[in-house]
Image (cartoon, rainbow, N blue to C red):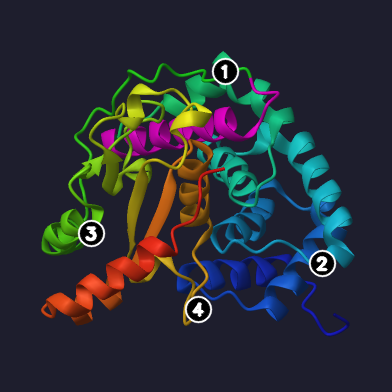
């Protein structure tokens, strides 16, 4: 760490580059984590955002040796400078905590104050406003699922986004191609539906299930709040991961995708992960598709 840059602008630029290029380099990220742990309390609010948020995007948690100082310094800095953060930046910081499996419960009251919400929604651009609402819904859902001290959900689940949720055309196309194979694999006692949203979660793209395998005889998963124990692991969420869902040249999923899987598992669903690139290569070979789907179904992660 002796030769690591000490200029905050350079450290922020390094982290922004790693995030935009999906580069999860442990040496660089550990050095930046060490820098943030030592300097967070003295850094401007905007610099904290630019350095910290990429850790959540890249799902990189500081090594144990520097972890305690990193989190203590960061949480103190965010608490002291919360009002200096732009509202969207504040939500990005809190979602980075969520992706790294740290519940930022001490900041909840600050988020749901009228003043913060007025600043967040004071936008003329409709697209920016929708993006802000989506971040807030995601934060609310994440805290409800992961933090026992959270008195949520704060936002009614019946509320829908202003615009229809758009599914990536690549996902729609590939799911349509393998759907018949998945129906056959699931068997006659199961239904396989495409592009499903569960009632327990906000209807935002983040929570779209590409395909859902569920028993014909049992309740549909969205009809069972938090899926009672007797219903857990009866249904399987099928998620297709696009190339940008992974860190560069790595099987490691980006932080938001790790969170997405974790939340479905917390609702008692098994999660079957499929790689878009692999499916594209074999989609014209029915036997290869059938083998791949069977292999991935056997490897599905159990609900929590």
Element under disc 1: helix
- Choose mark 3 or mark 4, whichever is in front: 3
Element under disc 3: helix
Q: Which residues are magenta?
A: 126-150
Residue at the disc numbered 4: 250
Residue drawn 80% across and 50% down? 71
Element under disc 2: helix
Q: Is residue 60 above or below residue 94?
A: below
Residue at the disc numbered 3: 185
Quadrant in which the N terminus is drawn? bottom right
Secondary structure character of the magenta stretch overall: helix
Residue at the disc numbered 1: 115
- Pointer 4 with pointer 2, Cβ within 8 A: no
Q: Position of residue 160 (x, y in %)?
A: 29, 24
Determine the image quadrant of residue 240: bottom left
Frontmost residue, 214 versus 85: 214
Residue at the disc numbered 2: 34
């Amino acid at each position: 760490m002796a030769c690591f840059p000490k200029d905050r602008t350079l450290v922020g630029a390094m982290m922004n580059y790693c995030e935009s290029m999906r580069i999860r380099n442990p040496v660089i990220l550990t050095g930046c984590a060490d820098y943030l742990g030592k300097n967070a309390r003295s850094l401007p609010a905007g610099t904290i955002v630019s350095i910290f948020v990429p850790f959540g995007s890249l799902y990189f948690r500081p090594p144990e040796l520097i972890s305690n100082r990193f989190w203590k310094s960061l949480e103190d800095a965010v608490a002291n400078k919360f009002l200096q953060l732009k509202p969207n930046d504040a939500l990005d910081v809190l979602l980075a905590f969520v992706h790294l499996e740290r519940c930022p419960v001490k900041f909840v009251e600050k988020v749901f104050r009228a003043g913060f919400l007025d600043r967040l929604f004071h936008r003329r651009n409709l697209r920016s406003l929708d993006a802000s609402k989506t971040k807030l819904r995601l934060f609310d859902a994440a805290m409800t699922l992961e933090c026992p001290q959270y008195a949520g959900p704060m936002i009614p689940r019946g509320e829908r986004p202003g615009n229809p949720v758009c599914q990536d055309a690549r996902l729609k196309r590939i799911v349509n191609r393998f759907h018949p194979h998945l129906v056959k694999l699931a068997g006659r006692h199961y239904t396989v539906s495409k592009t499903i949203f569960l009632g327990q979660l906000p209807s935002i793209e983040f929570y779209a299930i590409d395909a859902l395998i569920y028993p014909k005889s049992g309740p549909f998963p969205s009809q069972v709040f938090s899926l009672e124990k007797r219903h857990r692991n009866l249904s399987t969420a099928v998620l297709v991961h696009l190339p940008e869902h992974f860190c560069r040249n790595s099987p490691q999923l980006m932080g938001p995708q790790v969170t997405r899987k974790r939340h479905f598992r917390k609702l008692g669903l098994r999660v079957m992960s499929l790689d878009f690139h692999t499916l594209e290569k074999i989609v014209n070979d029915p036997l290869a598709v059938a083998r791949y789907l069977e292999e991935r179904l056997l490897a599905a992660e159990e609900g929590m």
